[in-house]
Image: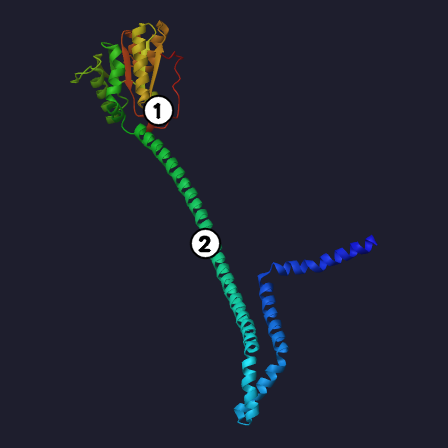
Amino acid sequence: MSQILTVAAVSAFSWSFPLLKAWDSLTALQWAAVVSALVLTIGAIIEYWEKLKLLALLVCKWILRRINPTELCVLRKLAIHSLGPILVVIGIAGDFVFEGRAFILEDRQEEQSRRIIGSLSEKAATAESKADSAITKSDKLGNIEDTIQLRLDAASTELSGIEQRVRVQGPRWELLEDNQSEFIDAMMPFSGQPATIIGMKCGDAVQTEPRKLAWDLLNFLGMFTTLKHNPGWRGIYREWHTCKVWPTAEGGNVIAVSSSASQAVKDAAKALCGTLNKIGISTMGYIIPDSPELRSQVDTDEGTDSPDSLALKDPTQVFIMVGINPGTVDTFGERKLHKRSKP
C-alpha cells in the first residue's frame, strides 16, 4: 500500500511540475487569461442562447420588413429584457478580443525589446572587444616605445663611447685645455718642482700635435706661463735627437724619475702621471734603478739625451717625454730594455 502511495505521489509531482513552470510563465498566464475570456464568452452565449436566438430572428424580420405588429411588440419587450444579457456577452467578448490583442502586442514589443537588448549586447561586446584591442595595441606601442628607448639609450651609450674614443684619438692638448683647472689644482701641492719636458726628434718630420701638448704642459705647470693661477713648476723644454723606434711604435707620454730621487720628486711624478691618465692622455711613468752599469747601458741604447739618461744624471727633476698620440699608431711591439719599477 505504501508503495502505491509513493508512486502516486511521484506521479502527481511529475504532472504538477510543468504546471508550476507554466504558473511562473508570463506568456502562459496571458494565453490562459485569453482562453478564460473565450470560455466565459461561450458560456454567456449558451446561457442566453434562447433569448438571443429569438431576438436575432425578430431583428432580421424587422430589417426585411416582414414583421407583424404582434412580433414587433414582442421584439420591443424582448429587447428590453435581453439588454442585460446582450451587454454581458458584448463585454465578455470585448474583453476576449481586446485582451488577446493586447497580449499579442505585448509579445511583439517584448520580442522587439529582446532584439534591441541583443543588438545592444552585441554592440557592447564589440565595443569591449575594440577596447581590449585598443589596450593590446597600446601595450604593444608601450613595448615598442620601451624598445625604442632602450635602443636610444644603447645608441647614446655607444655614441658617448665613440665620442670618448674620438677625443682620445684626437688632439690631446684639447683634453688638457678642457681640464685645465683640474690639472692645475692637482699639481698645486708640488709647487716649485723642477722638471724637464722632452720632445721627440726621431727624424725630420715635425710632430705638430705632440709639440702643442708640450707647450700646454709648459704653460699649465708654470714653467713659461702668463697664468696667474699656476703650480709654479721650474724647468725647460728640450728635444731628444737620438731617440730610437720604440717611442714612435708605442706612442703616449713617459714620465721618468731616478730611484735616487727624493720621495717628494717621486710623489710629484706619480701625481702628474695619474692626472694625465685621468683626463684621457695616455702616460706611462716609472722609476729607473740607478747603477753605473745601467747608466752605461741607457746611454748606449737610448742616447745621452734620452729621458732615462737625463733622470739618472739629475735625480732632483721629473722628466716628461711627450710622445705621439697612441690613438694614431699601431702598437706592433714592446720596449725590451730592462725591468723597471713604476712610481
Say whether residue 127 is left or right of residue 226.
right
Callout 1 touching callout 2 (CB < 8 Å): no
- Is residue 213 placed above or below 71 in the rendered structure? above
Residue 133: percent from left, percent from top:
46, 50
Q: CA distance from mark 1 to mark 2?
A: 73 Å
Which amino acid does the dot numbered 2 rest on? Answer: Ala
Residue 254: percent from left, percent from top:
32, 17
- Is residue 155 placed above or below 35 in the rendered structure? above
Camera sees residue 299: no
At horizontal 61% and vertical 75% (from top left) the residue drawn is 44
What label does residue 127 carry, if any? Answer: 2
Dot 1 corresponds to which residue?
249
Earlier residue among tags 1 and 2: 2
Q: Which color scheme did the rendering employ for the protein?
A: rainbow
Between 262 and 82, the one lying in front of the other is 82
Quadrant containing the C terminus is: top left
Secondary structure category for the residue under label 1: helix
Say whether residue 61 is left or right of residue 183.
right
- Is residue 165 placed above or below 310 in the rendered structure? below
Quadrant containing the N terminus is: bottom right
- Is residue 285 placed above or below 97 in the rendered structure? above
At horizontal 54% and vertical 71% (from top left) the residue drawn is 95
The quarter of the displayed image where residue 164 is located: top left
Between 165 and 95, the one lying in front of the other is 95
Q: Nearer the viewer, mark 1 or mark 2?
A: 2
Between 114 and 169, the one lying in front of the other is 114
At horizontal 21% and vertical 20% (from top left) the residue drawn is 215
Mark 2 crowd level (few <14, some 14–19, many ≥20, 10 Å Cα): few
Which amino acid does the dot numbered 1 rest on? Answer: Ala
Residue 331: percent from left, percent from top:
38, 26
